[in-house]
Image (cartoon, grey):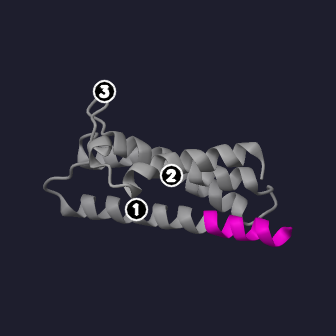
Amino acid sequence: MRLPTLLLLLLLIACTLPLMLRMEQVLVFALPGDLPLGTLLAAIAFLSGNAAVISAQSPGSLLYPLAWLGLAAGTVWLPLGIYLSGNPALSFSGDDSASSLFWRFTLGLGVATCVLLLWSGWYSWRRR
């Protein structure tokens, strides 16, 4: 495993660790601009997960463009959420369709990132 891939995977683990350990106090800590730390960690996790797949795969691989698509989706995740909710805390009020759209996008992005990571790991293991 290459060093950039390893570092990106460690960053992904570090970002998801507070969620897995149920550290709510850390996740709701407000950063400047009232952005919760958990929201920033989620955005970084989406980006680092897809960047790890890009780092691990060659440009000719099927996973490579899919990971770039995931990286693009991860890049717009936070700005889209802030735009749709109207606040950095991603607290939706009123319009259920915007909330539903955003949380479905979030679920799809999370599942796609996990699938790409697992597929990339399996593909790298199989190539050896």
Judged from the image, the secondary structure of the residue bearing numbered disc 3 is loop
Name the one closer to the observer, 106 or 45.
45
At horizontal 36% and vertical 45% (from top left) the residue drawn is 39
Q: Which residue is mark 2?
A: 46
Q: Earlier in the sequence, mark 1 or mark 2?
A: 2
Locate residue 34: give its quadrant.
top left
- In the rendered image of this protein, does residue 109 appear above or below residue 76? below
Q: Which residue is mark 1?
A: 105
At horizontal 47% and vertical 62% (from top left) the residue drawn is 110
| Kind of residue indicated by mark 2 | Phe
Chief secondary structure of the magenta portion: helix
Q: Residue furthest right?
A: 128
- In the rendered image of this protein, does residue 4 appear above or below residue 13? above
x and y percentages locating residue 42 in the rendered image: 42, 49
Residue 77 shown left or right of residue 69 in the figure: left
x and y percentages locating residue 41 in the rendered image: 43, 44
Density class for disc 2 (Cα within 10 Å; few <14, some 14-19, many ≥20) is many
Q: Earlier in the sequence, mark 2 or mark 3?
A: 3
Locate residue 53: give its quadrant.
bottom right
Residue 104 shown left or right of residue 8 in the figure: left
At horizontal 47% and vertical 61% (from top left) the residue drawn is 109
Part of the protein shown in magenta: 117-128
| Number of marks in the rendered image | 3
| Contact flag, marks 3 and 1 (Cβ < 8 Å) | no
Residue 120 sits inside the magenta stretch: yes
